[in-house]
Image: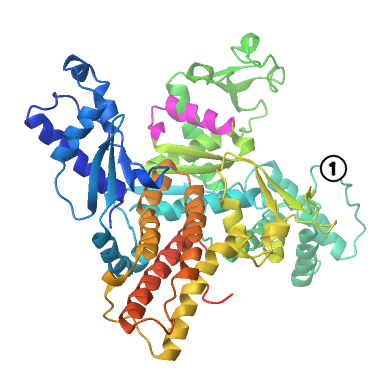
Amino acid sequence: MKPLSQLHAHLVEQAVQSAQTAGELPAFAPLPIEIRPPKKAEQGDYYCPVAMQIAALPESKTAKLNPFDIAQTLVRHLPAADFVGQAEAARPGFINFRLSESWLKQQVEAVINEGEALFQLDIGAGKRAQVEFVSANPTGPLHVGRSRGAMVGDTIARLLQAAGYQVEREYYFNNAGVQMVNLGNSLRLRYLQALGKPVEIPGAEDKTFYHGDYLKVFGRDLAAEHGAALVDADWKPFKEYAEKRMFDVIKATLARVNIRHDIFFNENSLYESGAVWETLKGLEAKGHVYRSTESENAGSVKSGEPDEYTGKGVATWFRSAPFGDDKDRVLVKSDGNPTYTLPDIAYHVNKLGRGFDLLVNILGADHGTQYKVVQYGIEALELDVSRIKVIIIQLVKMIRGGQELKMSTRAGNIDTLDDLIDQTSPDVVRYILLARSADSHLNFDLDLAVKQSNDNPVYYIQNAHVRCAGIFREAELRGVTDTGADVNLLGESELRFMRKALELGDVIQTAATELEPHRIAFYAHELAGVFHPIYDEVRALHTDLTPNVQQARLRFYRAAQVVFKRVLSLMGMTAPERM
């Protein structure tokens, strides 16, 4: 099935061409045809404002054509279509469409036949997309701050798949650098402590030591496995052990919320392959690198703040300012170690080299500057930066009893994603973290999240699927089936739901092309809002119904169940049959 906006737009395109051929409209370059659902039901099911656009063209002004006349002309030239019940011109210059009721009834069968592939689109047919998300360093369990990006990234991947793309989910983890050395040293102390050796554990103020209780567990396990064999070892074997154990924990946590990555990209591989230094050479060859104790634009930095590397010795700088940055950036510090910027650019060179048509990066709010610098680096290397799309995820606050919770496991509050799942459920976590635009701050109301009532949007949506499933359990007990149902017996209430259900194609199309997964969450709630009143008034198994009407209504509820299952699947949620 195609999105209804696409079907209507095609009709309008044909009408424009027909009117131009007949000499009733002037010749002009093709315009984008926008089809929208109206805000008021009396305006129809869809409307098109293209007559307003045409009237604003110089060619139309010369011909003295007004928007309403253009709309009337286009209506006369619209080709017949089985899905259009009525098309009319409306002032000041719109075309209002109403769907055919007989066609709507037939879509019950179309929805059932498409099943789990309902509104599988072809926008991305033949194209490859990669979505990189989570990408937390394996230094500790996933915390709530990373969780929102996980839900947004996975749902974008699902929507891109529904739009026809071949999608790969990638996790980029930083297992190189100082923080991993610190992790290894931290575990080493916990290991020695587990063996009963006299060690001094740094205080909370020491930012080079990881204080998480998980390292105590790892230390005891290491001591049980190896005894005292590692007493004289340096940080390296401890870093490798902690990294593996922690990454297993992270993957298990993500699996709880139905997230699985296809690729786990190791940052260290960029050093092993020489890609980091090849990237530096590439930037240098194009004249975008220099070595100095300070940046070339040190006196003109917009922020007025001196660069943190100025005066620390001769560093290697990237001339990012000419690309739009507010200052040049250090690629390699005076001690010879790269900053985060250089391997990040190398990583994106690697991704572009893998032939993806679209690269989506899901990043936290603290990466707002860094991702731009990386894009400047890609641009400097004369690679196609337009293939890279970045989604910045804003912060999440946990609310209980109307008060914000301070993140602290020791205080008994939410700190990790596992904690959040334990206190709510995987489906609740997915939906609530998805239900606002990624660039908006989000309050996660724990009191609401655990409610088993229609106040809880997750319960409200899933209960629609549960109600459909319950109807069919009861129908089976009564020996009633929907086989051979005559959908022409359906009424206006059922068609009201079908109108909303058939918006799904447009929601998928817009959410996928705009990379706005919250749209599917909004739509799911709206769809449930249309369904529940219909469920209350349209009984499928009432004793007063004729067998034919019973069958038709059962068929309708089967279609409704398909739609809810598809929508829940797009959000990575389950479609329960009982609650």
Majority secondary structure in the magenta region:
helix
The x, y position of residue 315, in whole percent, is 63, 22
Quarter in which the N terminus is drawn:
bottom left
Which element type, helix, strand or loop, lies under badge 1?
Answer: loop
Residue named by callout 1: 206
Q: How is the image coloured?
A: rainbow
Query: Could you tell whether 83 is left or right of 505 in the image?
Result: left
Comparing 475 with 117, the one in front is 475
Q: Is residue 495 magenta?
A: no
User: From the viewer's perspective, is residue 33 above or below residue 111?
Assistant: above
Query: Could you tell whether 449 is left or right of 276 in the image?
Result: right
User: From the viewer's perspective, is residue 389 above or below residue 157?
Assistant: above
The x, y position of residue 356, in whole percent, is 37, 45
**Is the residue marked by circle 1 packed among few (<14), some (14-19), or many (20+) residues within 10 Å?**
few
Q: Residue at x 65, y 62 (%)?
A: 249
Quarter in which the C terminus is drawn:
bottom right
Q: How many marks?
A: 1
User: From the viewer's perspective, is residue 478 above or below residue 116?
Assistant: below
Residue bounds of the magenta highlight = 369-386
Q: Residue at x 79, y 55 (%)?
A: 212
The x, y position of residue 470, in whole percent, is 49, 79
Comparing 186 with 94, the one in front is 94
| Amino acid, disc 1 | Asp
Q: Residue furthest top?
A: 299
